[in-house]
Image (cartoon, rainbow, N blue to C red):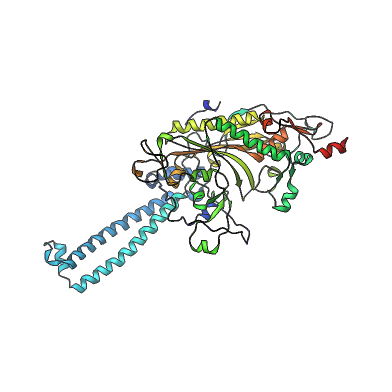
Amino acid sequence: MQRALKRLHGPSLRLATRPATHRSYASVAAKRPSNGPKPALDIKHIRQHPELYETTCRERLYTAQADNPAKIIALSEQLVQLQHSGRGLRERANLLRRVLANPATLTDDSTLENLKALSREELHADARRIKEELAVIVKSETDAQRAIEELALQLPNLTSAETPRGEEPRVLSYINERPVFDEAHGGGGSHNIWRSHVHIGTELGILDFASASLTSGWGWYYLVGAAAQLEQALVQYALAVVIRHGWTQVAPPSLVYGHIGAACGFQPRDQHGEQQVYAVAQSDEDAAAGVPPLALAGTSEIPLAGMKAMTTLDAAELPLKHVAVSRCYRAEAGARGASTKGLYRVHEFTKVEMFAWARADPDEAQDVFDEMLDMQTEILASLGLHARVLEMPAADLGASAARKVDMEAWFPSRQEHSGGWGEVTSASICTDYQTRRLQTRARPGGHAAGSSTGGAADAGFPWTLNGTALAVPRVLAALLEVGWDEKAKTVTIPECLRPWMDGRDKIGPPAHRKKSSN
């Protein structure tokens, strides 16, 4: 269906003796190690098209970064002046060395004649002066280059022409029919009374938020019995779909270096600081030694992208498509309220994530993107969820995405504050934003994949794409709500999940409750 859419040394860890601070990957990555990937940013393109980058920042609500292109141009001009002054001083230093080394062999050049007129002491004094001035210039050049890089790193990716400008998404299509519920919220013995997943999970004894709040705090939860089994069923089903399409499963680490997360584009968005993480406490020894700080990954997109950091791929193996199951950690789970109650916005969850590298070719990238959307559609359709497919607007894009398509499922419990809609999947094209920052290159044929030595000059930067195959909590919540039978006090299990649910077609109340009701 979606193919019809328009194209376009290891660290020493210890238990924290203080609460883990809520920081962005960008703040965790304040110091990139010398052996980490050095960004290969296209500064020339920024200088040549400052208005484009400024407009991009404003459209995407990165207003604090909108002046960065102008600052980069000003710093680049200063850098040129410094380099010119440095060249002049180095030329004079070379002449001084020649005069001091063997003045008898010099020609009658007028400049050399002026130098030969100086005493040896004066020549040495001039050489010391030049050395001191060059040291100042070199430091100024380094500072200017670092400042230019830092300003460029703060810029978001350029926005795709497919992306709507403004803040409103464009509806592309719908999946399944919307379920019909009785208007009355309770009573009457009707089968079609809707309940929130919090009510249903408590009624069936499969969700426990109260115990989690005592154990871990707000935003955490226990899945019990059938809910825990349903989580595994959702994961296995999503994996089965993606692997059937030829994607390779990877089990990634949950801890990532802060500079890897920042290179993937997970940084504060303007003044809001949306992407926040749980940083792992470091020992004093590691901090003093400059060991990079670690953080819990908010998505396996980060370790999957980092898997090919500082690597040159063979373009013949592209597109390279991976899928991973991981626990994801989000320190900022949103404000408390009806719209975030229960499983909708949590600090830790299981997610099946797709990640791919493609040639820097819009058509090939679009093919991979369409494949991701096709699989997301297949999964939601098979689960029986009513959903809409949205081309997300520029104001909603994260730093790395050039284009993003979300799928929102319909939740009966969310009707009063969002029309019932809630995001359950997302897919993004990130062009070369991540590969430039991670030094992931692709060389045309003839070289072994994964080679990290030699030939980088003729290797370009592949594009990356990522997409959610399935994020468990929200999908589980939607299944509970749309599958609830008020009279029977049961939830219907989608047929596609039953092989992993011992063949059951319903989730009912605990056995002791059944007995007590008889």
Report which quarter residue 471 is drawn in: top right
Taking depth in this image into account, of 325 and 424 the one nearest to the observer is: 325
- Residue found 77% across the figure and 33% down from its top: 490
Q: Is residue 449 left or right of residue 409?
A: left
Give above or below for 36 relative to 1. Answer: below
Residue 479 visible? The answer is: yes
Quadrant in which the N terminus appears? top right
Coordinates of residue 482 in the picture (x, y in percent): 72, 32
Give above or below for 27 relative to 426. Answer: below
Q: Is residue 351 left or right of residue 507?
A: left
Report which quarter residue 358 is drawn in: top left
Coordinates of residue 299 in the picture (x, y in percent): 57, 44
- Residue found 38% across the figure and 53% down from its top: 74
- Residue found 34% across the figure and 64% down from its top: 136
Residue 337 visible? The answer is: no
Taking depth in this image into account, of 450 and 152 the one nearest to the observer is: 450
Q: Is residue 73 left or right of residue 178?
A: left
